[in-house]
């Protein structure tokens, strides 16, 4: 059974994956290199050519659903007024260069190389910056506690840092702005994951003519289902609104229930559908080009864009709210990176998705040039009658599964946020034995399902939901551009000319798109902001509480000299037994331990300070799984348990206790061979260990709460109170490790805010 990882535990720490504990100096645990063998990059997930080809095929059903189905709704979303041939040529030129620049250059070529240990997306970029530079607010404090870790391991040397990197490291305001931007982008994507399935499920069974008319105003990522139903509205009668909602809920529930089987199995089911769609629509496009307008590709010249805006002015600018939908789903191309690998996503995009979209849009535009008033039904009317119903069936099936890309991306983003301790602890299940990034979170899955059903019931026909998507898409793209620019400057050290070229091209391009879609704020664009605000409040509340907790622990940590002073008190008794004391302080001991000693006046004869270490590898080598060391006091040791994402971490029973004591015995015997020693002392130490093991075994974990006094600010009272509510309701770490309740002790302590 695979481990259901408790990433970012409030009590059991997740240590940065590129370092490991291996030794102590002067009685303190120290961080050195990672376990033997490289941490797998995105290219280790499908090393063979056939493996990469298979992964590329699977990406069709997961990564590109929203992007490749965009031809269903782009033209109908534009409120064109008496469009001319030149207007259509200008629109196609805009879509072609949007796909080429944002899709090919930005995401498929640049962004996919900015992965953080194989993970992609907005939070992965922030994590990448935090790992290489001291610019994370919470993470930097955590790393800062590892005072023994050479600075060169955590960061580039100061001599190699850019001026911008030094500015971010010095400025707390810059760090907070960067965190805010990251949280906004992250929450926007999660909000997209809520709205996308809802609008897809609602649209699937809604055949009302009024709702079809509402679609003309949609800026929706997965309104593709509604467009699919547009093709069959005439032959079928209307159905009641209540039945629409019930059927929509059934589709949503079925889709979310499939998530527990993992990305690989879901993609196996969905990829044939998306593959059929990706291959058939460009064939129809080629037919339409030849039959209607063979010279359509002259529109690839950018001067048609200039002429389009010259003729249409403000109206042309407002139409960008529709053309931006041609690139919807592109963020999932980056955010779903952890579920696959770079090569497979690039292969699928360059050789299938991009050509399919270019040819399909060319075919649609060729048809519309000859039939300019058919833009409201711009997809189905350009399909030849002979293949109409087969394409309709494929389109309907593709639209149903198009939401998968955002659902998978949401799982990845939540996992990254939890790992960096910016989100409350939830269960994260790894559904693949080889791909660390292929994850599923049952709690997140069911919360998404409930919220999606609630959105359907609250917003009914979905008009406002549709208008929200253009805002989400454009803002997330703009935030990704900003973060990628920082990565280029501060980590990649790209030439300034290339950085400036990248930034100005994409910032201006996406900024214009944002300005156009923000006109939809009062028509539904406020929805993603409302969802993002709620999610951001949760993330910031958790982050603020964790920051305060870390600050208190680092300020009140107990060093070895202080511990020796506590134990020198005659009132402190060494009682029989073996104690595992869980701690997240690497350079010293948690204040909870001092609190325990002062109030109980006892310490077990053998006390082992435990730290759990999670690595981005399937399994840790057996000889590196348990690392133990003496801490300079009699009967006091340090132990690090290292495990991979596919290993079972179960501390129950005598087997685990025997593994730790055997490792400790071996360490005692081996260390005695390097220093002058008394054989009788070694034998006594081993005997004490065996006696303690036989006497009793306890696992002690700290349980802390904040004490918010009268002198605390109103901000602390609100945020820390909210943090305590989340902390008391999120998953506890120790029970998940399989520790028997009879052996578990929780030591409570109030941290003064």
Image (spheres, rainbow, N blue to C red):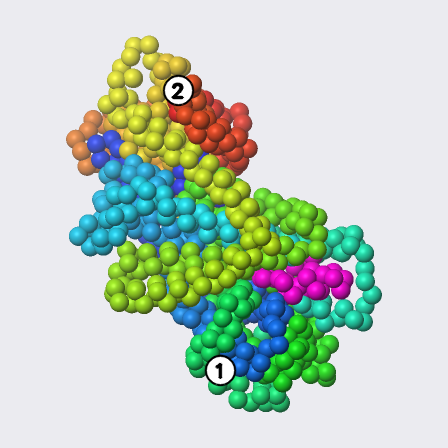
Q: Sort mark 2 into few (<14), some (14-19) or many (20+) by Cα contacts within 10 Å.
A: few
Residue 116: name its quadrant: bottom left
Q: Sort mark 1 into few (<14), some (14-19) or many (20+) by Cα contacts within 10 Å.
A: many
Q: Nearer the viewer, mark 1 or mark 2?
A: 1
Asked if residue 498 lies left or right of residue 280, the reply is left
Asked if residue 540 lies left or right of residue 199, the reply is left
Q: Which residue is mark 2?
A: 711
Say the numbered circle drawn on residue 299.
1
Say the numbered circle drawn on residue 319.
none
Residue 707: name its quadrant: top left
Residue 223 within the magenta-colored segment of the rendering:
yes
Residue 633 within the magenta-colored segment of the rendering:
no
Q: Is residue 624 visible from the viewing direction of this image?
A: no
Q: Give 581 or 238, whichever is nearer the viewer.
A: 238
Query: Which residues, given as a range, are shown in magenta?
Result: 200-226
The structure residue drawn at horizontal position 35% and vertical position 35%, both measured from the top left corner, is: 639
Q: Give 346 or 659, whichever is nearer the viewer.
A: 346
Q: Give 58 or 189, whichever is nearer the viewer.
A: 189
Instruction: Tell me how many marks there are.
Output: 2
Q: Give 43 or 467, whichever is nearer the viewer.
A: 467
The structure residue drawn at horizontal position 58% and vertical position 52%, both measured from the top left corner, is: 522
The structure residue drawn at horizontal position 34% and vertical position 31%, both measured from the top left corner, is: 551
Asked if residue 197 lies left or right of residue 146, the reply is right
Q: In the image, residue 38 lies at what x, y percent?
A: 34, 56
Mark before the other along the chain sequence, 1 or 2: 1
The quarter of the rendered structure image containing the C terminus is: top left
Asked if residue 242 lies left or right of residue 449, the reply is right
Q: In the image, residue 365 lies at what x, y percent?
A: 58, 80
């Amino acid at each position: 059974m695979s481990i259901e990882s408790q990433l970012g535990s409030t009590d059991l720490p997740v240590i940065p994956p590129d370092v490991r504990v291996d030794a102590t100096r002067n009685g303190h645990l120290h961080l050195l290199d990672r376990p033997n063998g490289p941490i797998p990059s995105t290219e280790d997930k499908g090393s063979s050519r056939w493996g990469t080809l298979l992964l590329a095929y699977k990406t069709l059903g997961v990564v590109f659903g929203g992007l490749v189905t965009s031809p269903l709704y782009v033209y109908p979303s534009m409120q064109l007024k008496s469009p001319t041939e030149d207007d259509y040529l200008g629109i196609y030129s805009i879509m072609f260069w949007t796909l080429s620049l944002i899709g090919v250059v930005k995401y498929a070529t640049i962004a996919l190389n900015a992965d953080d240990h194989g993970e992609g997306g907005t939070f992965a970029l922030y994590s990448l910056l935090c790992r290489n530079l001291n610019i994370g607010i919470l993470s930097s404090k955590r790393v800062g506690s590892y005072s023994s870790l050479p600075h060169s391991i955590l960061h580039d040397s100061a001599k190699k840092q850019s001026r911008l990197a030094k500015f971010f490291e010095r400025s707390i305001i810059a760090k907070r702005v960067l965190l805010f931007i990251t949280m906004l982008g992250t929450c926007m994507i999660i909000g997209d994951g809520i709205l996308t399935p809802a609008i897809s499920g609602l649209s699937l069974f809604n055949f009302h003519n009024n709702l079809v008319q509402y679609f003309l105003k949609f800026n929706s990522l997965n309104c593709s289902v509604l467009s699919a139903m547009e093709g069959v509205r005439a032959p079928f009668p209307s159905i009641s609104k209540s039945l629409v909602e019930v059927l929509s809920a059934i589709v949503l529930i079925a889709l979310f229930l499939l998530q527990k089987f993992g990305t690989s199995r879901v993609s196996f089911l969905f990829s044939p559908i998306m593959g059929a769609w990706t291959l058939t629509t460009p064939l129809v496009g080629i037919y339409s080009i030849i039959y209607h307008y063979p010279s359509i590709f002259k529109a690839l010249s950018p001067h048609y864009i200039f002429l389009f805006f010259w003729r249409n002015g403000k109206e042309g600018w407002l139409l960008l709210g529709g053309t931006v939908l041609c690139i919807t789903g592109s963020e999932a191309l980056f955010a779903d990176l952890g579920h696959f690998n770079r090569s497979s996503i690039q292969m699928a995009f360059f050789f299938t998705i991009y050509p399919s979209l270019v040819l399909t849009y060319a075919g649609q535009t060729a048809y519309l040039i000859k039939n300019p008033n058919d833009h409201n039904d711009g997809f189905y009317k350009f399909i030849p009658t002979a293949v109409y119903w087969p394409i309709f069936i494929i389109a309907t099936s593709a639209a149903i599964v198009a939401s998968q890309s955002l659902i998978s991306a949401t799982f990845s983003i939540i996992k990254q946020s939890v790992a960096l301790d910016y989100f409350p602890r939830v269960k994260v299940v790894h559904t693949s034995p080889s791909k660390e990034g292929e994850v599923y979170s049952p709690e997140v899955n069911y919360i998404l399902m409930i919220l999606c059903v609630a959105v359907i019931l609250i917003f009914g026909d979905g008009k406002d939901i549709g208008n929200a998507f253009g805002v989400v898409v454009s803002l997330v793209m703009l935030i990704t551009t900003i973060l990628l620019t920082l990565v280029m400057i501060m980590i990649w050290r790209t030439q300034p000319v290339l950085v400036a070229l990248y930034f100005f091209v994409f910032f201006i391009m996406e900024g214009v798109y944002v300005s156009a879609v923000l006109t939809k704020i009062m028509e539904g664009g406020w929805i993603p902001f409302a969802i993002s605000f709620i999610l951001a409040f949760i993330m910031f509340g958790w982050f603020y509480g964790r920051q305060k907790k870390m600050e208190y622990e680092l300020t009140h940590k107990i060093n070895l000299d202080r511990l020796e002073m506590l134990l020198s008190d005659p009132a402190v008794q060494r009682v029989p037994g073996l104690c595992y004391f869980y701690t997240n302080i690497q350079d010293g001991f948690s204040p909870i331990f001092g609190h325990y000693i002062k109030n109980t006046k006892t310490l077990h004869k053998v006390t082992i300070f435990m730290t759990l270490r999670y690595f981005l590898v399937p399994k840790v080598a057996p000889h590196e799984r348990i690392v133990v060391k003496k801490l300079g006091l009699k009967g006091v040791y340090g132990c690090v348990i290292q495990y991979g994402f596919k290993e079972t971490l179960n501390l129950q029973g005598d087997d685990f206790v025997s593994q730790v004591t055997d490792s400790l015995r071996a360490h005692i015997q081996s260390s005695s061979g390097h220093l002058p020693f008394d054989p009788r002392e070694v034998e006594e130490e081993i005997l004490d260990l065996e006696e303690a093991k036989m006497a009793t075994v306890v696992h002690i974990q700290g349980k802390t709460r904040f004490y918010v006094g009268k002198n605390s600010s109103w901000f602390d009272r609100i945020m820390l109170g909210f943090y305590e509510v989340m902390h008391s309701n999120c998953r506890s770490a120790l029970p998940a490790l399989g520790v028997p309740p009879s052996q578990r002790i929780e030591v409570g302590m109030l941290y003064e805010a």
